[in-house]
Amino acid sequence: MFDVIGLGCATLDFLGIVPEMPQFDDEIKMSTTSQQGGGEVATALVTLAKLGSSVAFIGKVGDDLIGEFIKQDFNNHNIDISNLVVQNSASSPISMILISQFTGDRAILACQHSMSDLLPSDIDTDIIERSRYLHLDGYWRQSAIAAAKFARDSGVKVVLDADVLAYDSQVNKLIELTDIVIASKNFSRLFSNTDDVQKSLEVISSFGPSIVGITLGSEGSFFCNEAGTFHTPAFQVEVVDTTGAGDVFHGAFIRGLLEGWELCKAVEFASAVAAIKCTKLGGRKGIPNFDEALGFLTIRDSKYFN
């Protein structure tokens, strides 16, 4: 049995902190650089593993050096990759990320890869049946829909990271098969055609999820379920880099559900873990373990951990 199975995209992130964003023909010196594994679901799984959960990844990489790095990084975090497809003579996804040294905001340049789509026939559905949660980002759309259908039929809860990359004409179908949707501000605006967070929550909820959340970065998050809507503020920290903060939030939120916590407590825990991550460069190096996260909460103005 696994606590969580994730199906999505895994990348290699090259990160650099810069004093300003370069223009064409500029040459900017990066003060700090790093290379780390990336990808929305992939980083959420790393978060879950660091917090003590058992996880497995379903996805695809090429047989290049980038693919080897991605595989090794999963292994380093004790993530099961027995269902990771390796495509011969294919290049794996890479992202180049520039981070402002003053604000922690970033610009992402996503490089093309040469892999073919991960197909529904590539998925061993038995591993989904042996899990408590299925976490998706919608990257491999047809496979995500097929996996969500199987999970729903098997009584496995489905969680969707709804970011702008997940937005297209088929996303409605995926949301209808999802139990918990956590959307970015940009996705919620596109999907609901409004900047009003409450209306966005209502529109997404109308497609069937029992829990819907919208993350707003430094403004915290809004969540709703059958009991109503509530806002959770973000924890204030000295931000180095916001890369992967949403992915980490999703992983930590699922860990809170695995603990059996009420929704408000799980969201506060996720906010704390994401905040801690933002104090380090990259999406993964700043992820705390479970005790470190609880320690952070006990010295903060926590509603649920003091």
Image (cartoon, grey):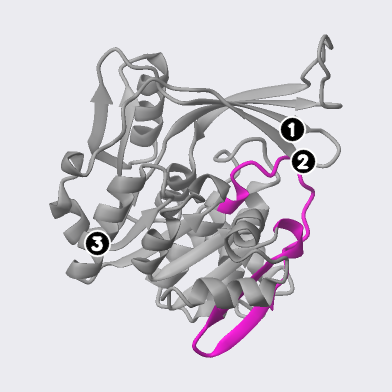
**Secondary structure of the residue carrying numbered label 3:** helix
The structure residue drawn at horizontal position 33% and vertical position 16%, both measured from the top left corner, is 90
- Above/below status of 230 relative to 60: below
Indicate the position of residue 243 as horizontal and vertical percent values: 64, 41
Magenta-span inclusion, residue 222: yes
Kindly tell me whether residue 288 is visible in this rendering: no
* Dot placed on the residue nearer the N-terminal end, 2 or 1: 1
- Asked if the residue under mark 2 is in contact with the one under mark 3, i.e. CB atoms within 8 Å, the reply is no
- Above/below status of 288 relative to 201: above
Mark 1 neighbour class, 10 Å CA radius: few under 14, some 14 to 19, many 20 or more: many
- Above/below status of 91 relative to 39: above
Give me the disc on residue 99: 1
Residue type highlighted by circle 1: Ile
Where the N terminus falls, by quadrant?
A: bottom left
Indicate the position of residue 266 as horizontal and vertical percent values: 52, 72
Between 265 and 40, the residue placed more toward the observer is: 40
- Above/below status of 301 relative to 294: below
Quarter of the image where one finds residue 202:
bottom right
Mark 3 neighbour class, 10 Å CA radius: few under 14, some 14 to 19, many 20 or more: some
Mark 2 neighbour class, 10 Å CA radius: few under 14, some 14 to 19, many 20 or more: many
Residue type highlighted by circle 3: Lys
Mark 1 or 3, closer to the camera = 3
